[in-house]
Image (cartoon, rainbow, N blue to C red):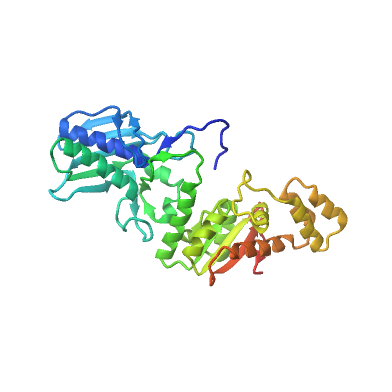
């Protein structure tokens, strides 16, 4: 996650909200011949934003409208993307149906809130679009038997920077958002992705998953155990979020892998490992070195250290990383349901496994 800017942060709009606005504008043009611009929508919590259109096309039996996504101050990979919705009439009595256009993915694995083969347009955005076009259709006195195709130019390339490939969503992005509003630097989207990764793993019979704090530790754990990408959970700093979800949605075997400093925090009882929300207690870390038999000078140097990496270097051949792994595993086990096999790997900056428990 990029550095949070100082000062008040500007909220943005989800891809689901943008798709809803585009679908409403396209439906209006299809039924009346005119595009509303800007187009206003009602979000699930009652907000009523209006969106300018960046594209308008009326092609006889279909209409297309586009909205540029504004994610506010959130470092969202889809900020600035164009969300297109094309609306055409469907079969009588069919209601609203959805299609994936270019840049919108298709679900290929069980475990997500959409059936395999469905376009990756989540339930909340579907409900928002259905309500919006039903309102337009009712105003014109016609039934809302409509086909909505959502597209995102360049979406397939953007999706490579998201969790979609390992969740089994192929061909592009997901259309997301439960409230329609993007809260800058919110943890909720990351936590939901962790949960989705676990759901997909469970639904596809994967019995060993690994949560890693970053790319280096993820690569190390994947190589060490020969794990497929679908078994890797991008835990990041949210160890607690992953472990709490696994408690109610267990997988037979779980590995946690992370850098020395992150695992020290977990060993010391922190479940949010981000540097702004938890800190290494160097006094405790120094006491652990003393427990391992290091001399007083080294122990005192550890107490005054600026970084956990300094302490790892001070330890030399002493198995401080193994001790950290053991205590981090104990902390993690306390958050899991019984019957889950758990191991812990500590990885250095070069990607070497320097500590583990069980050994």
Position of the N terminus, as image quadrant, is top right
The tally of labels here is: 0
- Viewer can see residue 64: no
Expressed as whole percent of the image width and height from the top left, the position of residue 82 reads 35, 35
Q: Quadrant of residue 223?
A: bottom right
Q: Nearer the viewer, residue 340 or 294?
A: 340
The residue closer to the viewer here, 34 or 272, is: 272
Counting from the top left corner in percent of width and height, residue 332 is at 60, 62
Q: Nearer the viewer, residue 297 or 223?
A: 297
Q: Is residue 141 above or below residue 107?
A: above
Q: Residue placed at 87% from the left, 56% from the top? A: 296
The structure residue drawn at horizontal position 74% and vertical position 60%, both measured from the top left corner, is: 320
- Name the spot of residue 211 as percent of width and height, x first: 54, 58
* Residue displayed at 29% across by 30% down: 39
Which residue in the rendered view is the most extreme toward the bottom? 339
Quadrant placement of the C terminus: bottom right
Q: Is the residue 78 above or below the residue 52 in the image?
A: below
The image quadrant of residue 268 is: bottom right
In percent of width and height, residue 308 lies at 72, 50
Residue 183 in view of the camera: yes
Above or below: residue 333 compared with residue 148: below
């Amino acid at each position: 996650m990029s550095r949070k800017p100082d000062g008040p942060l500007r909220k943005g709009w989800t891809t689901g909200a943008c798709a809803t606005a585009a679908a409403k504008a396209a439906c209006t043009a299809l039924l009346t011949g005119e595009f509303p611009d800007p187009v206003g929508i009602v979000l699930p919590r009652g907000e009523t934003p209006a969106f300018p259109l960046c594209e308008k096309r009326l092609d006889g039996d279909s209409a297309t409208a586009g909205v540029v996504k504004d994610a506010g101050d959130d470092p969202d990979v889809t900020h600035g993307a164009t969300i297109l919705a094309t609306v055409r009439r469907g079969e009588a009595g069919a209601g609203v149906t959805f299609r994936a256009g270019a840049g919108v993915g298709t679900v290929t694995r069980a475990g997500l809130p959409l059936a395999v083969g469905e376009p990756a347009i989540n339930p909340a955005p579907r409900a928002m679009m259905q309500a919006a076009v039903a309102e337009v259709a009712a105003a014109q006195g016609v039934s809302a038997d409509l086909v909505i195709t959502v597209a995102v130019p360049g979406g397939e390339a953007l999706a490579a920077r998201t969790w979609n490939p390992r969740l089994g969503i192929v061909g592009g992005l997901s259309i997301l958002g439960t409230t329609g509003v993007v809260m800058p630097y919110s943890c909720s989207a990351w936590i939901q992705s962790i949960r989705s990764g676990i759901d997909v793993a469970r639904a596809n019979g994967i019995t060993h998953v690994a949560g890693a704090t970053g790319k280096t530790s993820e690569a190390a754990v994947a190589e060490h155990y020969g794990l497929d990408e679908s078994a890797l959970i991008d835990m990041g700093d949210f160890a607690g979020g992953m472990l709490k979800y696994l408690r109610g949605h267990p997988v037979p075997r779980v590995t946690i892998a992370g850098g020395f400093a992150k695992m020290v925090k977990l060993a010391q009882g922190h479940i949010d490992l981000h540097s702004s929300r938890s800190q290494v207690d160097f006094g405790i870390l120094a006491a652990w070195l003393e427990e391992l038999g290091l001399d007083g000078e080294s122990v005192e140097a550890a107490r005054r250290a600026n970084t956990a990496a300094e302490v790892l270097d001070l330890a030399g051949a002493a198995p401080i990383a193994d001790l950290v792994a053991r205590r981090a595993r104990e902390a993690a086990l306390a958050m899991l349901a019984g019957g889950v096999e758990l191991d812990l790997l500590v990885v250095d900056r070069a990607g070497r496994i320097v500590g583990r428990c069980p050994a």
